[in-house]
Image (spheres, coloured by chain):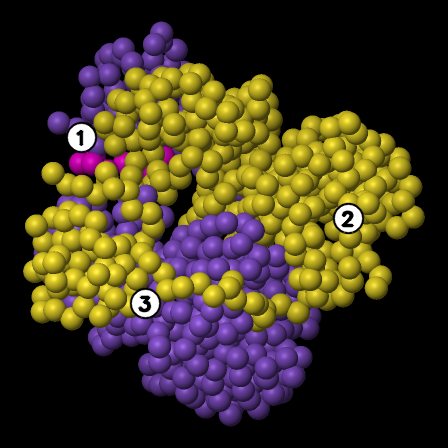
Chain colours: A purple, B yellow
Amino acid sequence: MSAIHIALLGYGTVGKGVYQTVQSHQKKLQAIFGKEVKISAILVKNLEKHHSPDDDVILTDDFDKIFSLEKLDIVIDAIVGKEPCFSYLQRAIKRGCHVITANKEMFAHYGSQLKRLANEHGVTLSFEATVAGGIPVIQTLKQLLNVNNIKKVQGILNGTSNFILTKMREENVPFSSALKLAQEKGYAEADPTNDVEGYDAFYKAVILSELAFGESPNWGESIREGIRGITPEQIEIFSSLGFRFKHVASIERTADGVQCAVKPVLVNEQHPFYHVEGVQNAVSIDGDIVGNISLQGPGAGMFPTASAILEDLVHINRKSVSPIFTEQKPDGDEASTVSFWAIGGDVNASILPTPIQVIERIHPNVLLVKAPEETVYAIHLPNVHVYQILGDVVYKGLVVS
Amino acid sequence: MSAIHIALLGYGTVGKGVYQTVQSHQKKLQAIFGKEVKISAILVKNLEKHHSPDDDVILTDDFDKIFSLEKLDIVIDAIVGKEPCFSYLQRAIKRGCHVITANKEMFAHYGSQLKRLANEHGVTLSFEATVAGGIPVIQTLKQLLNVNNIKKVQGILNGTSNFILTKMREENVPFSSALKLAQEKGYAEADPTNDVEGYDAFYKAVILSELAFGESPNWGESIREGIRGITPEQIEIFSSLGFRFKHVASIERTADGVQCAVKPVLVNEQHPFYHVEGVQNAVSIDGDIVGNISLQGPGAGMFPTASAILEDLVHINRKSVSPIFTEQKPDGDEASTVSFWAIGGDVNASILPTPIQVIERIHPNVLLVKAPEETVYAIHLPNVHVYQILGDVVYKGLVVS
C-alpha cells in the first residue's frame, strides 16, 4: 500500500499527541486518504532526550536530513519560536509539501508571508491548532466568513493566565502562589512571561485578526497588559460586587484599522466568559448576520491540540473525503449510567428501592440521590417529580442552610 | 453575466431572511460564485398573503411551475411539515438540483433517504439550518468527526421552551403566563405543542444523531418529556438550591444503540448550560480526542437562520472558493467607543475629567464610570486601577449593600 509521508517537527507534548493519535486513528485516516498515513521522521532539538517511537521512524536533530527525504508530502510543525521554524516551513513549502502548524508566535509574525508562499506553490497551509487548542475556532470563523462580515472577536485565549486568575479567586492566594501551582501542574513554564504578560494571547489575536479582517492590528498601537498586577484584595472586592477578572484578547475592526487589546477585564454573571474557568478557552464572535456565537473548550493539552492538527490533516485531503454520515463503532458495552437526581415533592427516603442511594435531603421537599436511570424512572408516586442533574454535583455548593 | 438560479420554497420569516440576505450580500456571493446569484421563484401556500419582492421573481403556489423552470440550480427549503416538502425535494434532487433545507421535522424523518438520493444524483444536500439556527453545529460536528469519535451530544435546541423556563424563573409566573408572553413576542405558535412538548428538540436530536453516530435513535424507546409540568414552586425551590431547569436534548452512543432523551433537567452554576437563557441555543459535544467543546448562539430568527442557509449555499461552490484571508470593508467610521469601567483604589470622583461620567460608588474603593477608552487610560494616579467591564452592566445587579 502506498503511503502519505509526514515529517513531524518537535516531539514535546503536542508532537507526541500527534504521533499517538496518527497511530491510534490509522484505520480512520487510511479510510479517508486511501493510503497509509505514516510519520516517517521526527525532528528534535536534543537527540539524547528522545528516542524514536518506532524502528522505521527517523529521529534526527538535523532538518536537512528531513528535507532530503525522498518521499515527503506533509510537514507538521509542533515546535516553538520564530526561528528556525519559519525557515524550515519556507523550505518545506518550496519543496511542495503541505504544511500544518501549531506555532502561534511564528505564525503571528510570518503567517501572511507563508500564506503567499503556499499559494504560489499550490500547497495547503493550515493553522487550526495555533489558536484555542481543540476548539475549532479557525474553521468556525471561515464558515461564518462565507456569509458574515465579522465585527468583533473576543476570547480567553491563554489557559495558563485563566488558570491563575481562577486559582487566585478560588483559594484567595496571591499571583505568585497561583503561578507556582500552575508550574507544578505543568500549565506554566519556568519563565511564564509569554502567558501571564499576554504575549501568547496577543499572537493568537493577530492570527484571528488576519483571518477575520484580512489584516493585522497595528502591533505598536495594540494594548498588551498582563495579570501580574492583580491582587487578592482586588479580586475579593470585585467578587463581592459580582465580577470576575478574565484576561481577554479582543480584536475589532474600526475606521482606523483593527484595534487589538489583551488585558484583564471584569465580567459579570451574565457574560459568557464568567464561567470559563481554569485552563479552558473561549471565543465569542460577532457577525453582522448571524449575531453572536460563542465557543468554549480545552485551549491546550496533548490530545485537544492533536485533534486540531489531525482535522487540518484531513482537510488537506478534503476533496476525496465522503463526509456527512460517518459510520462509527460503539464505545463498548457500558452498563446503565448512574447519575445524580433531585427527587422533589412529598417523598420519604425510606420507601425508595435500594439501587437509589440517598445522598442528602437538601431541602424540606427535595432529596438528592444517586441512582441508575431505570430505577429513578420507576418511581411512580403522586406529587413526586424526578429531575436529572447534569454535570458534576458539588456537595458543598448544594447544601443550603 | 450568467446566473445561479435558485427557487425558494416558503416565504415566512426564514424565507424572507434568505431573500433579503441574498440581495444584501449579492456582491460577496458573486465574488464567490463568479456569477449572479438569483432567487428566480418563490413558492407560497397562499398567494393572497404575499406579493413578489421583485418584478422578475415568480411568486407561485404551484410547485410544478417551479419544477418546470428552464433554469434551476438550487432549491432552498424554508417550509415546515413532512409533506409535501419531502416530495418536492425528491423531485428537485432527481432533476439534478442542489438542495438546502431548514425543515427539521421533514429531515428527521427522511434525511437518510434524501441523502442517498442526493448521492445517487451527484448533488449536494445541506442542512446546517435544521439545528440550532445560526450556530454552525453541523459544520463543527463534521469537522470534529474527521478525527474524533463522538461520545455524546447535549443541547438546548428549542429557544421557545428555554425562553418560557427563563421567564417563569425570572418573573415567578406559571407556565401559562410565560407561554402567553412567548406567543406575544412571536417565539411560540398558537399551538405550542411542537416546542414545549419537546418534538422540535427531538427532531433536531435525530438529525444530530445521524450525523454524529451514523444512525437514528430508536424513536419508540426515546424519552420525550415536555416542560408543562414544571411549576413556579419547583423553580423557586431549585433556584434556592442553586439549580436552574433547562430543557435538554441528549444523544449518546451505547452498546444498545443510540439513546436519546429530551427532558427538563437541573443544572448548577458550573454547568455551561446554566447561563444559556431566553431564546439562546447551546450544544455541548464530547469527542474522544478533543474532549468537550460547547457552542452557544441564536437558535432561531430571521437572520441567524438565513446565515446558516447562506453558509450552506457557499459550500455548494466550495471548490471554487478561495478562502482564508478574506478582504473586508470597515463597518464605517465609528467614534471612539464609550463603555463601562471600574476604577478601583483611592480615587475621588471630583478629580476625574468630565468625559468620565461617574455612575455610582459601588464599593468604598470602587467607582463605576462610563467613559471613552482614551480618557480612562489617561488616568495616572498612584494605587488606582482601571478595569473595563465587558458586556451589559445591570445596575441593580451591581449595587452591593
Label 1 SS: loop
Mark 2 residue crowding within 10 angstroms, few (<14) / some (14–19) / many (20+): many
Q: CB under 8 Å between callouts 3 and 1?
A: no
Q: Residue at x 34, y 9 (%)?
A: A383
Q: What residue would you read off at disc 1?
A: A399
At label 1, which amino acid type do we have?
A: Val
Circle nearer the viewer, 1 or 2:
2
Q: Quadrant of residue B199?
A: top right
Mark 3 residue crowding within 10 angstroms, few (<14) / some (14–19) / many (20+): many
Q: Is residue B291 left or right of residue A320?
A: left
Q: Is residue B162 above or below residue A197?
A: above
Q: Is residue A285 above or below residue A376?
A: below
Residue B39 - label: 2
Region rendered in magenta = A390-397
Q: Is residue A239 left or right of residue A99?
A: left
For the residues beneath circles 3 and 2, the answer to whether they share a chain is no
Q: What residue would you read off at disc 3?
A: A262
Label 3 SS: strand
